[in-house]
Amino acid sequence: MNRLRIRELVRKEFIQLFRDKRNWPILIAAPIIQLLVFGYVVNYDIKLVRIALLDQSRTRESRMIADAFTANAIFRITQYPQDPRSLEQALLAGKVDLAVKIGPDFSARIRRGDTAAVQILSDGSMSNMAAMRLSYTASILENVNRVLIRELYPQQMSYGRIDGRIRTWYNANLDSQNFFVPGIVAFLIMLISLLLTSMAIIREKEAGTMEQLIVTPVTSVELIAGKTIPYTVISLTQMIVVTAIAVLWFDIPLSGSIALLFGAACIFLLSTLGIGLFISTISATQQQAMMTTFFFVVPFFMLSGFVFPIANMPAIVQILTYLNPLRYFLVIVRGIFLKGVGIEILWPQFLALTILGVLVFSGAIARFRKRLD
């Protein structure tokens, strides 16, 4: 390979890329905007649960339940319907997240020593959020239950018990941002590198400059190097920017090695750049290349474990995830960001990512030909 020819191809690619001002938003603004939007929108943290409370008992015991909800910073009783139909209508209209119904015989049953039921209706349209809301609700009711039992049976009972000392590692406050934002960093690198690389060769054909490249002494390998090096530099630069935003703006801990993180990004780019080159060889126009790119992006995103745990997927789908480079890169990124682990722990992901990258990039080079058809 001739370094001078590669250098001039890289220089030409940068000039051609930045000369078109329509590319500036994609290169500069889009990654930052997407990181900010995803960082705030993709969030499973429960900060407010709206409750409609129907208290048909109106006694001290029923008020204890209402006070337990209002004393919690997460719950807020926003409606006090007067009948069961209004209670259900508030939940149906989406005005509340939980509906709590306390029957008229609630206090009488408790004072007799019987079990008193409290009906909890939850909006299950978002199953994950509903499950967490119900879990918090069960915890509050259990606390009220313990207070009532101590009042009804005041005698002192001494017995051994299990004292669970719970400690959460790597994300002590269970913040969703700490889980999602590092994943967004990985996803943005894949999206930008795939999109730009897939249109690199097509742009030459549509501009009519591919004929000029064909008659030059530039080899196919040199042409590929000249086309991929600029987008490697751009992807790594964008990674620096979004990583800085993740750490400084979202306060995501970066516990591991920065050098290891960028080494993993370079290996990951072998796969994304290879897929981008493959797309450019099978596409006839930039629009077709863009549509084909998103055909790859969506399955990569869904099968990566970014949002949905791979263990919950069907067995046949789990097998397909082994062909997804984003799956391994997400484990590496989150491991370096949150756990601070090194190559001694992440070597299986590095190995799988390297094998996939070499195979994909080699296949793309083998398919690429310096010709118009």
Image (cartoon, rainbow, N blue to C red):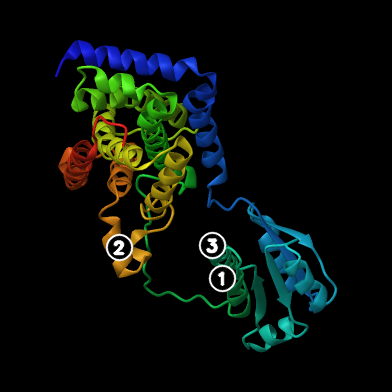
Q: Position of residue 99 (x, y in %)?
A: 71, 70
The numbered mark at residue 161 is none
Identify which amino acid the numbered label 2 is placed on: Gln
> How far from the left and from the top, in percent, is residue 62?
73, 73
> For residue 318, which numbered disc appears in the image?
2
Observer-nearest of 317 and 363: 363
Which residue lies under the disc numbered 3? 132
Quadrant hosting residue 118: bottom right
Query: Dot 3: few (<14), some (14–19), or many (≥20) neighbours within 10 Å?
Result: some
Q: Is residue 324 above or below residue 18?
A: below
Element under label 1?
helix
Question: Closer to the camera, 50 or 69?
Answer: 50
| Side of 295 where 343 appears, left or right | left
Q: Nearer the viewer, mark 3 or mark 2?
A: 2
- Helix or strand or loop: what does disc 3 sit on? helix
Q: Residues within 10 Å of mark 2 (few under 14, many from 20)?
A: some
Toward the viewer: 79 or 166?
Answer: 79
Tag 1: amino acid: Glu
3D distance between C-alphas at marks 3 and 2: 26 Å
- Residue mark closest to the camera, 1 vs 3: 3
> Which label sits on residue 142?
1
Q: Amino acid at mark 3?
A: Met
- On the image, the x and y values in percent for residue 373 come to 31, 37
Rendered residue at 48%/15% (across/down): 19
Q: CA distance from mark 1 to mark 3?
A: 15 Å
